[in-house]
Amino acid sequence: MASQQGKWREEQILILCPGSQTTMAQLGCNELTPPAYRIPTRMFKDEDEEDQWRPYATVKRKKAHPPGEAPKSDDDEWEYVEDPDSVEGAVFPIQGASKQGISHPMMIS
């Protein structure tokens, strides 16, 4: 009969603790240690595609071109830049989308 001992090592376990503002994560189950990673629990509505969400706020801005060089097309003139620190327009799913005026089947309300 096979033994269950040694089947899983402590560092193979991922612990996630979702919160309303921050999700905490830790690899391994060390005793009485705070989580090693803190990730903001928020999503941003995609401006271009309906029913799509992004993990960071994105800002559309003009590309910086070297002096004397013109953009090749209109699409080449603009770029999207992610802002990982922004909370403007953020939706915090655990707080409930209905409290934030958003109706979406994947959001907890």
Image (cartoon, rainbow, N blue to C red):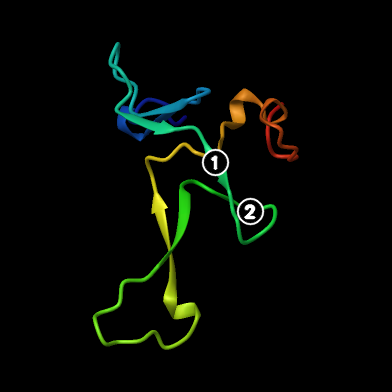
Q: Is residue 67 above or below residue 10?
A: below
Figure quadrant of the C terminus: top right
| Residue 5, disc | none
Front position in the image: 6 or 9: 9
Residue 51: percent from the left, percent from the top?
Answer: 69, 52
Residue 13: percent from the left, percent from the top?
Answer: 39, 31
Residue at 50 percent across and 22 percent down: it is 19
Residue at mark 2: 52
From the viewer's perspective, tell me whether residue 35 is left or right of residue 40. Answer: left
Front position in the image: 21 or 26: 21
Q: Is residue 35 above or below residue 67?
A: above
From the viewer's perspective, tell me whether residue 52 is left or right of residue 104. Answer: left
Residue at mark 1: 43
The amino acid on which the numbered mark 2 sits, given as a three-letter code, is: Gln
Secondary structure state at the residue bearing disc 2: loop
Q: Can residue 13 be spotted in the picture?
A: yes
Residue density around tag 1, few if under 14, some if 14–19, many if 20 or more, within 10 Å: some
